[in-house]
Image (tube, rainbow, N blue to C red):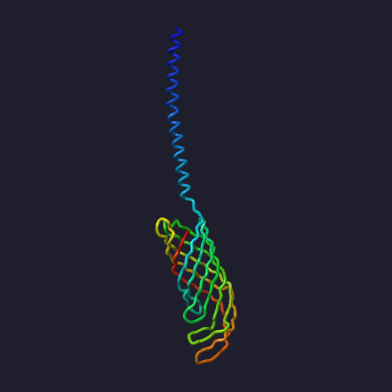
Amino acid sequence: MPHIFRAGALVLGSLLGSLASVSLVPSVAQASEFATDTTASANVESTHVQPTTVAISPYLGLGVGEKKSWMTLGIDAVASYKFLRVGALGETSGGVFGSELYTLGAVVGVGTSELDDHLEANLGVEGGAHFYRRLGDHLFSSNVSGGSADLPFAGIRASLTYRFGKSRVFGLGVLGFVRTDLGHAAADATVDSWGDGKSTEKITAGESSYGAALKLSLAF
């Protein structure tokens, strides 16, 4: 009888060991699958991290005001974090003849790069100061004294940029803006004109304007 019990105990122990090994196999497989899913999830999350980038963009375009039109050469620097956009801009505007306009301002807005892997769209509000110089200058003037006025402005700016390659560092795009001066200012200008001599004019500065430009962009 002891031999029978002993043999039974050995058989029972062998069966229990087999069951334990079988039950451990799915657990190990599940643990491995969980670890793989966690790693994949972490990799997916890491690919969606959007670090802060800064884009510097020189641009050349045409502006149109209530009294005249002008060529505009400018540059802006915009920092991006997720959908937020914050930056600064500077412009110089004018023609071969006529007054000059300098612009300094800031822009705050939103943007997205989800339209396409390489396409970015931005929309923001801008504000700053317009510095009018040589007001009263014209084709037949030889010298202008005075004719300066400074005014605050506010406006809206939109841009669309296509970035090249996998790094998306270089880009080419278009931008447009609509602005208005917040008030008016009177400026006295002394103008020397060919054939008419010297005259003093009182000129009022301040207007609404709009424009468009082509831009290059470098992001890092």
Q: Nearer the viewer, residue 2 or 181?
A: 2
Relative to residue 23, is residue 76 depicted above or below?
below
Quadrant for the N terminus, please: top left
Name which residue lies at 49% across and 51% down: 49
Who is closer to the viewer here, 211 or 150? Answer: 150
Most extreme residue toward the top is: 1
Furthest toward the left, the residue is 165
For image coordinates 46% across by 8% down, the residue present is 2
The x and y percentages for residue 192 are: 53, 88
209, above or below 122, in the image: below
The number of numbered discs placed on residues in the rendered structure image is 0
Q: Quadrant of residue 26?
A: top left
Q: At x 49% / y 68%, what residue is drawn?
A: 75
Residue 92 at x, y percent in the picture: 51, 73
- Residue 10 in percent (x, y) is at 44, 15
Between 165 and 83, the one nearer to me in the picture = 165
In x, y percent, where is residue 142? 51, 87
